[in-house]
Image (cartoon, helix red, strand yellow):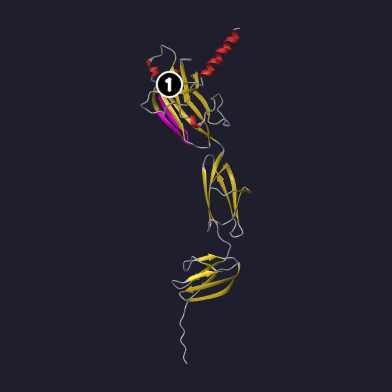
């Protein structure tokens, strides 16, 4: 009978953890976690607010609490509480909040306390031996509020001014981002992208496992590009690739005001600039006022050409 009564009490208090609790205190530190560890100090009764930037590679938080030596003699005298799902964003003027309790436990009689907070249900983060592992919290349910309060009477005032050290380390997934930019002469150019020998669609960002990768770009009209690159854990690697055409280039030079047609299509050209054309036979035509002239020419695959079009006046003696 006694064992059954204790079980019922345990389930009752566990169910209360899903409801908001009242939190009172002054926020001493407002911390935003990026990809680097962060260290802060705080005193009893102070609240520490912990936010995390929206980063797809942060899987969790590892908290290391260094406990002042003068507290070690007071066993089970201090509680650490961590809350999430706050009703208001923490700031240094507001002193009352509501939040869901994520952790509530006594401070151990040791110099260090380790707390692991997964930020995803699928988090596979490795934890420090002896860590307290909390339930998973989504980043959207942050920030967290952390506080330490005494639960026993008779504690000297000198102890109540003790300073705690808190180190927060983001746990990064073993992935990074490839930011790929491919420049080609025309937005309609067609080419194939192979990432680690697998064909992929043309987009900007790709999430990849950390390590060495290879990208290859192939096309019938451009020189093949092959490059190895490294993806760092939790970071973005940028790669810019410029496609170089395999097609022959033809440079046109013509009088000012002339219109040039290549195979019946009017060219939008700037004198001295080249355009790529397919190998084979072509017809160029120039129109200048009422004057026109056309010529046929042949382009080989491995050569570039210059087509100079000019008007001249010829004088002849009779």
Q: Which residues are magenta?
A: 29-42
The quarter of the picture where the N terminus appears is top right
Q: Is residue 68 visible?
A: no
Q: Residue furthest right?
A: 197
The quarter holding residue 11 reads top right
- How many residues crowd around disc 1 within 10 Å: few (fewer than 14), some, or many (20 or more)? many
Q: Residue furthest bottom?
A: 318
Q: Is residue 111 above or below residue 178?
A: above
Q: Is residue 33 magenta?
A: yes
In the picture of the structure, the residue carrying the numbered disc 1 is: 23
Q: Residue furthest top?
A: 1
Give the residue drawn at x 51%, y 29%.
Answer: 62
Secondary element at tag 1: strand
Q: Please name whichever residue, 234 or 68, is drawn nearer the observer in this view of the structure.
A: 234
Q: Is residue 118 magenta?
A: no
Q: Is residue 284 visible?
A: yes
Q: Please name whichever residue, 256 or 177, is drawn nearer the observer in this view of the structure.
A: 256
Report the number of discs: 1
Q: Percent position (x, y) of residue 310?
A: 48, 76
Q: Please name whichever residue, 156 or 309, is drawn nearer the observer in this view of the structure.
A: 309
Q: What is the magenta segment's predominant secondary structure?
A: strand
Q: Is residue 39 above or below residue 302?
A: above
Q: Is residue 215 above or below residue 43?
A: below
In the image, is 75 to the left or to the right of 196?
left
Q: Percent position (x, y) of residue 223?
A: 59, 59
In the image, is 236 to the left or to the right of 89?
right
Q: Percent position (x, y) of residue 268?
A: 49, 65
Q: Is residue 310 above or below residue 201?
A: below
Q: Percent position (x, y) of residue 226?
A: 59, 53
Q: Residue furthest front?
A: 290
Give the residue drawn at x 55%, y 70%.
Answer: 305
């Amino acid at each position: 009978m006694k064992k059954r009564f204790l079980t019922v009490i345990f389930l009752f208090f566990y169910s209360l953890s899903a409801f908001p609790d009242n939190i009172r205190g002054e926020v001493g530190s407002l911390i935003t976690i990026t990809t680097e560890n962060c260290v802060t100090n705080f005193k009893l009764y102070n609240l520490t607010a912990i936010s995390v930037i929206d980063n797809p590679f942060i899987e969790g938080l590892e908290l290391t609490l260094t406990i002042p030596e003068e507290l070690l003699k007071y066993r089970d005298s201090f509680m650490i509480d961590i809350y999430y799902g706050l009703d208001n964003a923490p700031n240094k003027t507001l002193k009352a909040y509501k939040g869901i309790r994520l952790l509530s436990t006594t401070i151990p009689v040791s110099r260090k306390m380790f707390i692991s907070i997964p930020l995803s249900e699928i988090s596979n983060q490795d934890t420090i031996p002896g860590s307290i592992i909390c339930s998973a919290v989504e980043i959207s349910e942050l920030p967290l509020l952390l506080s330490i309060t005494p639960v026993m009477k008779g504690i000297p005032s000198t102890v109540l001014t003790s300073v705690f050290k808190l180190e927060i380390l983001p746990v990064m997934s073993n992935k990074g981002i490839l930011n790929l930019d491919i420049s080609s002469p025309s937005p309609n150019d067609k080419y194939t992208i192979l990432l680690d020998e697998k064909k992929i669609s043309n987009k900007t960002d790709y999430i990849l496992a950390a390590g060495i990768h290879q990208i290859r770009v192939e096309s019938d009209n451009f020189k093949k590009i092959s490059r190895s690159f490294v993806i760092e854990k939790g970071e973005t690697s940028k790669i810019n690739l410029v496609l170089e055409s395999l097609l022959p280039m033809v440079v046109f030079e013509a009088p000012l005001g002339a219109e040039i047609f290549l195979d019946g299509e009017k060219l939008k050209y700037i004198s001295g600039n080249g355009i790529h054309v397919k190998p084979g036979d072509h017809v160029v035509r120039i129109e200048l006022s009422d004057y026109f002239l056309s010529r046929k020419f042949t382009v080989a695959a491995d050569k570039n050409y210059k087509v100079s079009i000019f008007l001249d006046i010829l004088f002849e003696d009779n």
